[in-house]
Image (cartoon, rainbow, N blue to C red):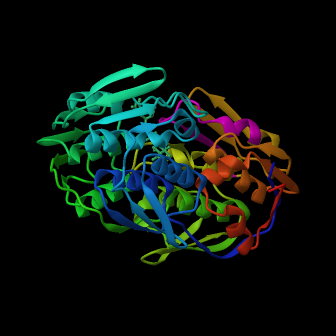
Amino acid sequence: MEYLEIKGGRALSGTVRISGAKNAALPMLAATLLAGGSFEIHQVPDLQDVRTFLQLLKELGVEIERTRDSTLVIDSSKLDSFEAPYDLVRRMRASVLVLSPLVARLGRARVSLPGGCAIGARPIDFHLKGLELMGAKLEIREGFVEARAKRLKGAHIYFDIPSVTGTENLMMAACLAKGNTVLENAAKEPEVVALGKMLQDMGAKIKGLGTDTIVVQGTTDLRPVSCTIIPDRIEAGTYLMAAGAAGGELVIENCVPEHLETVIIKLKAAGLKIKVIDADKLKVKRRGRLRSVDIKTQPYPGFPTDLQAQIMVLMATAGRLSVITETIFENRFMHVAELKRLGADIRVEGRSAIVKGVKHLYGAPVMATDLRASASLVLAGLAAKGTTVVQGLEHLDRGYEKMDEKLLSVGARIRRIGDN
Ligand code: UD1
């Protein structure tokens, strides 16, 4: 198995280029199922999760060609299957994003139920209830959900909690439904807006993107488009924090500073110097020890749960006491035990982690348990004295494009070692 060996304590310097956002790429790839024809999608990140999703599309009959490094031509004219098998859904929950497009276009979908995952139960009941309200007949059998509808119809749908993929699934369903759909308490994440804009370009009539009420007027007529995936705000946030963990100065290019507002406010409060130096560039600098700040994860525009593990690393060596509260997923503190192996002083009480800053972390072998936890362990390795070995890279590679190469290019002492 491959692993990363990181020799910590080296300040970073240089420029990191951010890739297209995984969480925008997946729903936008799913949206190609809604209209037959040839789509061109630019800035698609080369990640394991994207490869898994492309494999799923291929199994559904979609043709895919990579023309340039990060451009895909996707032809969904020959879509001929309505089944998402267990093996692919098990590997990546976001596979459930094919559910609505398949019902909407083919009148039928059979999608394996995802089951639990490392960070919590993560049900898909909102997706299913929404489709039922839109007139789909649902049946759960043999671990699959089967949905059928001659034509979906518009409905008034309220999310008890704003759900990112739930909003994306139902927004796609609504585009081809008969009549109007209102999604209340919808997710406002930039990735939801990016999908909505792609659907608008395809001919969908959508209002209220980026607010908590999205209104979709259904149509029968969607067409293929050419579009570009937005930069990954979680990757950008992770590199801001890499500079915070290792020290030094980084330029983060190809990012959208506006998508990182809350994160930047918190990092500045912790003592990082962050400046917008261009519409798509940030400069970050750390001098001296960081200050402790409290963090509470919230739906966008709040502090993202996908950066909670990474900021915990910064707080692990900050001046005083920080309380980090996770409100989105119930079991998202798996990294705590690993950070403690490096000497962090962290106590979990219910949904909060109480982090008492120590002077130094010290390198040790650690094991990644999920995607964002694995990034936090890499940052911890950069901060720690001595050598850290991070195992479980299959998690990191699901969502970070060439993280070790990017860090190496800005001066980190990091090596991928293993049998591949
Ligand atoms: C998406 C992101 C993930 C991020 C998360 C929260 C993608 C591919 N993944 O995941 O990286 O961490 O948003 O920002 O975009 N819930 C239900 N029932 C449902 C759906 C959700 O109870 O049917 C709950 C979840 O358990 C969770 C909360 O709603 O507590 C928000 O989850 P949701 O926004 O749906 O997360 P994902 O879309 O799975």
- Residue projecting furthest to the left: 179
The picture quadrant where one finds residue 195 is: bottom left
Ligand 1's quadrant: top left
Identify which residue, 185 or 201, lies in the foreground: 201
Q: Is residue 326 above or below residue 396?
A: above
Identify which residue, 200 or 289, lies in the foreground: 200
- Residue projecting furthest to the right: 386
Name the residue at 55% across, 28% down.
116
The x, y position of residue 211, in whole percent, is: 26, 50
The x, y position of residue 51, in whole percent, is: 56, 54
Q: Quadrant of the C terminus?
A: bottom right
Magenta stretch, residue numbers: 318-338
Task: Look at the image and tell me whether residue 163 can be seen.
Answer: no
- Residue 113 appears left or right of 146: right
- Residue 410 appears left or right of 224: right
Q: Is residue 256 above or below residue 97?
A: below
Instruction: State how many labels appear.
Output: 0
Is residue 323 covered in magenta? yes
The x, y position of residue 314, in whole percent, is: 66, 53
Is residue 361 covered in magenta? no
Name the residue at 44% across, 42% down.
298
The x, y position of residue 224, in whole percent, is: 29, 63
Q: Is residue 379 above or below residue 325?
A: below
Identify which residue, 27 or 248, lies in the foreground: 27
The picture quadrant where one finds residue 37 is: bottom left
Task: Look at the image and tell me whether residue 104 can be seen.
Answer: yes
